[in-house]
Image (spheres, helix red, strand yellow):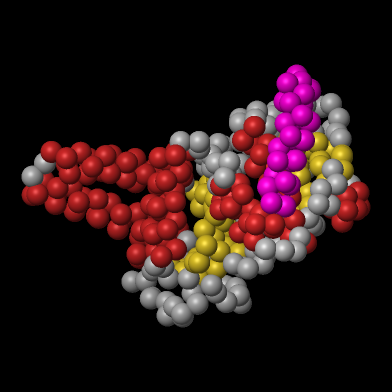
Amino acid sequence: MRKPRDFGETDRIVAVTLDPNTITSIDPDEVHEWRIAIYDLVEENRFAPARVKAHGPYALHVSIVGNYIVLDVRHPETYEPIAAHYLSLTPFRRLIRDYFRIRDSYYEAIKVSSPFQIEAVDMARRGMHNEAAELLRTRLDNKLEMDLNTARRLFTLICAVQPYARRIDERASSLPAVLFVCSMNSVRSPIAAALARRLFPGRLIARSAGVRSGKADAFVHEVMEEIGIDMSVHTPHTMDELVATHFDLVVTLSPDAAAAVAQRGLDARAIEHWPMPDPTSVEGNREAVLSAYRGLRDTLQQRVRERLEPLVAAPAPSPAAGR
């Protein structure tokens, strides 16, 4: 029998973000399904990393690398890493298939079936969810602790994002790789990377990082939402967390980023500095601040389009070239 954990008031997830490089979709119905799954998980959960001294609440960043779901636990304000665990999808394959099969049967039953038939399908759905939740807790035992209802909601989120994963190994991909770097990976560099992914979907790998860790920025969310880009998926990262070691282009967007990249000696075919104003330094009313963020967004959109178009159009270099 599993010994129940005594969860404290702060032992909970208060924010969930998705890695936009490995979990991608432009279908609004799919994105809506992710948001519902995230909302349900954040709304009610009991969760804590094991074997660490950190105290909650926590932010959870989810990505997919190969056949693994990466559950990256972070501080919700500073986004400093606390614990990260790779969860193999292999033991969950049958349950994920059952999830979609039973879900579709349930939706169909609601339309045409009797209450008795709907209840039977719903019982099968609950049974499958409980089995998946127990397996999830077992696989994460002594790594990430959660109660059964939290595990059920986390499994639902895994099912929602898993079919739309882009399982690209950045270390082996032949796609052009671009890295944008700014001070805290909160405003300039994540906007640039998001625009690159939007402008050239599936044609490049766009990453962003900061010299140091920062906070998610609500104004970034707002101005990017205006052009249909969901920035709630963004978690600030530092250069220390980069997986890839080679980039075709590195773009620095702040003076300290330029100095940090030069000192780090990244393996890059080209390094460019694009001086960009920091809209967080603008004083004034809300509309004046939003105007500064929109100006940055629009300037970056034009610059990213003009600079990256020839990069993605060029033939892929041989693997040994420039390495």
Please provide percent x and percent y for residue 236: 67, 56
Left or right? Give the position of 273 relative to 117. Answer: right
Please provide percent x and percent y for residue 75: 61, 68
Q: Is residue 203 above or below residue 188?
A: above
Is residue 316 at least partly visible in the picture?
no
Please provide percent x and percent y for residue 181: 78, 49
**Quadrant in the rendering for residue 251:** top right
Quadrant placement of the C terminus: top right
What's the magenta region? 291-318
Is residue 100 at least partly visible in the picture?
yes
Left or right? Give the position of 58 relative to 190. Answer: left
Left or right? Give the position of 99 relative to 241. Answer: left
At horizontal 86% and vertical 35% (from top left) the residue drawn is 270
Left or right? Give the position of 103 relative to 219. Answer: left
At horizontal 17% and vertical 44% (from top left) the residue drawn is 110
**Quadrant in the rendering for residue 216:** bottom right
Please provide percent x and percent y for residue 57: 53, 72
